[in-house]
Structures are given as structure tokens and as C-alpha cells.
């Protein structure tokens, strides 16, 4: 099963959840032959994401419904900007309204929060990454929204990257043992990333041969010390290890973290806590 098939099944499930055996209100109040026309507009400034899934909702409700977009994925829209025009049977438009907007608002919210974090970081600093802290079933859509907002994707799942976290270390017996086994067993091309919580663990991971250090829940001051430690470890050569800061980073703290010299900043809140963007469907 590919990602497009998964997305279509998600939409089918969302529609079943909302419609059940039928849209009772629309059926009782709107004659079947009534034509409809509506505009989707941004209520507040936002970064747009989710157009494909929005259109597919109406395609599944009724292929007679036509959706024409007036903005593209990743566009920065002011309040009041029109996103799409929808025409077709009035009942069908009303039936698909809530589910289509739920997807669009959720994904545009993620794109918007990503852009806000990048603006707070300033230019020329580390790359902003997402994490696996996504809504179950929506990972592909939410990671696409991060890209629309200007960010980058970390590994998609457990299958496309090696990231040794605290519980792996405990289960393996030690950080050194976990990194050593990962390096021995990983196929060519896979980088071995290790999560470290302090400078002592960072040094241990370096000696074990980790390719990337995830500096977890460190203050900006400690992050600077970790960067200096790694640079000293490889001196006089340039450092050969990438550094990722993560843990509790938000709009208030990301600018200071961006100044510490790390290569990446990963923020789980981009996907698990981004507020939904405000969009509405206005009947014409």
C-alpha cells in the first residue's frame, strides 16, 4: 500500500465518521437539485497546506463537485484571501464542508507554525526539523505541511533512520554498546544518531563513533559547551559529526538555540501542538 492509498483510506474513514448513513440536515433542508457555490477564505494570516486532501474529500463525497484553487501549497496568505471556489450540488458541498476544512485547517496550522519558528530563528542558522510526534495516520500529510512551511523532514519512521534514544541505551546496556552494534549492523548510507543528555554522554557517543548527536533538553549554555566539546574532539580538523538540538524548544526559546552552533533544531510541537489555522467556507 502506498501513501496515496493510505490518504484516500483516511479520507474515507473521516467521511464515514462524520456522515455515517447520511447527512440528515442537508437532506431535510436542501432540495436535491439545488446548485451550490462557495468560497474558502483565510480568516487569519497563514501558510497554506493540504490542498490535495481537501479536493479529494469532495471527490469522494460527489465527483460532480468542482474545486478550483486560487492559491498554492506553501503560499503565505493574508486574512480574507480566497483559497478556493467550490461549485456543484449544494447538498454535496454542505456534506463535505467540515471534513475538508478539518484537514485544511490542521495542515495549514502546521505549515504556519513551522514558518513562525523559522522567522524566530532568523536567517543563516540551523535547519528546522520535524519529528515522529505526529497524529496517527496523518504523518505523510503533516510532514508535507512542515515542508510547505519551510522546514525539513527528519526520518519518516523507524525504517529509514537509526536514532538511538534513552530507552535503546538502557535496553542495550550502554550507549557505547548501542552505537557500536548500530554501526556494525546498519546498511551502507545510514547515519547512526545517538541521543545524549549531558556532556559526558556526548563524549561517550563521539568515542563510540556516532555520526549525529541529538542534544536532548540542554540549555543554550550547555549546547554551546557541547558544540565546543565536539569541535575540540576533532581539532584541528573540522568536526565530522552533525549536532541536533531537541527537547522543549518553542517560539520563545528557538532564537537562542539557533545561536549555539548546532546544525539542526528538531521541534515535536510543530506537529503535535500546532494550533489549527482559521479558514472558513462562505456560501455565495
Image (cartoon, rainbow, N blue to C red):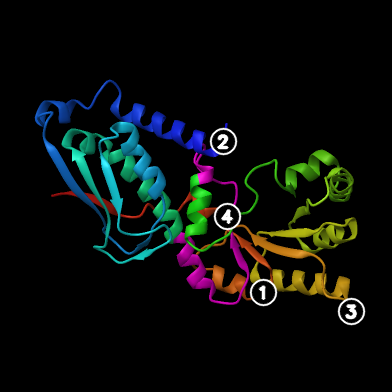
x 51%, y 68%: residue: 118
Q: Position of residue 210 (x, y in %)?
A: 83, 56
Q: Earlier in the sequence, mark 2 or mark 1?
A: 2
Q: Which residue in the structure is indicated by mark 2?
A: 2
x 44%, y 34%: residue: 8
Distance of label 3 from label 1 (alpha carbons): 20 Å
From what the image shows, is residue 27 above or below residue 235? above
Q: Which residue in the structure is indicated by mark 4?
A: 130
- Circles 1, 4 touching at the beta carbon (< 8 Å): no
Position of residue 42 in the picture relative to residue 124 (left or right): left
Distance of label 1 from label 4 (alpha carbons): 19 Å
Tell which tag, 1 or 4, sits nearer the viewer: 4
Q: Which residue in the structure is indicated by mark 3?
A: 236
Distance of label 3 from label 4 (alpha carbons): 33 Å
How many marks do you count on the picture? 4
Closest to the observer, 162 or 258 = 162
Element carrying mark 3:
loop
* 228 drawn magenta: no
Amino acid at each position: 500500500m502506498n501513501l496515496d492509498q493510505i490518504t484516500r483510506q483516511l479520507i474515507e474513514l473521516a467521511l464515514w465518521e462524520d456522515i455515517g448513513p447520511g447527512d440528515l440536515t442537508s437532506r431535510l433542508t436542501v432540495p436535491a437539485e439545488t446548485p451550490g457555490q462557495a468560497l474558502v477564505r483565510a480568516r487569519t494570516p497563514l501558510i497554506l497546506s493540504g490542498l490535495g486532501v481537501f479536493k479529494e474529500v469532495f471527490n469522494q463525497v460527489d465527483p460532480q463537485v468542482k474545486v478550483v484553487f486560487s492559491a498554492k501549497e506553501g503560499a503565505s496568505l493574508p486574512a480574507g484571501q480566497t483559497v478556493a471556489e467550490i461549485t456543484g450540488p449544494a447538498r454535496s458541498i454542505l456534506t463535505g464542508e467540515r471534513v475538508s476544512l478539518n484537514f485544511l485547517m490542521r495542515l495549514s496550522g502546521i505549515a504556519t507554525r513551522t514558518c513562525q519558528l523559522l522567522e524566530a530563528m532568523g536567517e543563516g542558522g540551523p535547519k528546522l526539523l520535524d519529528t515522529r510526534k505526529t497524529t496517527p495516520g496523518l504523518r505523510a500529510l503533516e510532514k508535507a505541511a512542515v515542508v510547505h512551511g519551510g522546514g525539513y523532514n527528519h526520518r519518516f519512521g523507524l525504517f529509514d533512520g537509526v536514532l538511538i534514544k534513552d530507552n535503546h541505551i538502557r535496553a542495550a546496556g550502554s550507549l557505547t554498546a548501542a552505537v557500536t552494534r548500530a554501526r556494525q549492523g546498519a546498511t551502507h548510507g545510514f547515519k547512526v544518531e545517538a541521543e545524549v543528555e549531558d556532556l559526558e554522554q556526548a563524549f561517550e557517543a563521539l568515542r563510540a563513533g556516532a555520526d549525529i548527536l541529538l542534544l536532548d533538553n540542554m540549555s543554550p549554555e550547555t549546547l554551546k559547551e557541547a558544540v565546543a566539546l565536539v569541535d575540540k574532539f576533532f581539532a584541528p580538523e573540522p568536526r565530522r559529526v552533525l549536532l541536533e538540538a531537541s527537547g522543549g524548544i518553542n517560539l520563545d526559546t528557538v532564537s537562542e538555540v539557533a545561536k549555539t552552533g548546532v546544525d539542526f533544531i528538531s521541534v515535536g510541537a510543530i506537529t503535535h501542538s500546532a494550533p489549527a489555522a482559521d479558514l472558513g467556507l462562505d456560501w455565495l
